[in-house]
Image: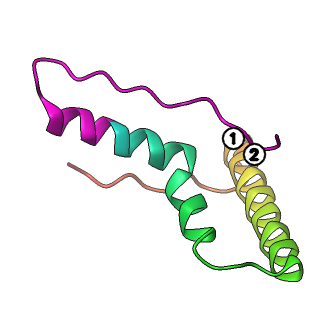
Amino acid sequence: MTGERPLVQIFVRDNNVDQALKALKKKMQREGSFREMKRHVHYEKPSEKRARQQAEAVRRARKLARKRAQREGLIAAPKKPAR
């Protein structure tokens, strides 16, 4: 089976279900599960899938190049908002 992921486990401590639910949502967001579920709501043509994957690859490459340029000092790092 391709693309199979291990199950996500969240432990409920002190009967605090709200905290466990928040942790579950955060884990699913980080893993991209929500994006995956939204993508499977409708059929995606193979040509659309290729175009989406190519666009994602371009985004990742640009992000990596931007981070590399920031590390090398070629461009300024984004300013962090003051708290």
**Which residue corresponds to the image point at 75% horizontal and 65% vertical from the top-left?**
56
Residue that mark 1 sits on: 71
Secondary structure, mark 1, is helix
Colour mode? rainbow
Which residue occupies the foreground of this view, 49 or 57?
49
- The amino acid marked with disc number 1 is Arg
Kindly identify the residue that appears in the image at 50 percent across and 58 percent down.
34
Please, is residue 23 above or below residue 48 in the view? above
Instruction: Reply yes or no: does residue 28 show up in magenta.
Output: no
Whether 13 is among the magenta residues is: yes
User: Is residue 74 left or right of 29 when viewed as pictured?
Assistant: right
Quadrant that contains the N terminus = top right
Is residue 3 found left or right of 15 in the rendered image?
right
Residue interval drawn in magenta: 1-23
Marks 2/1 in contact by CB < 8 Å: the verdict is yes
Q: Position of residue 12 (x, y in %)?
A: 23, 23
Quarter holding residue 11 = top left
Quick one: which residue is furthest to the front in this view?
1
**Which residue bears the numbered disc 2?**
68
Q: Is most of the magenta stretch helix, strand or loop? A: loop
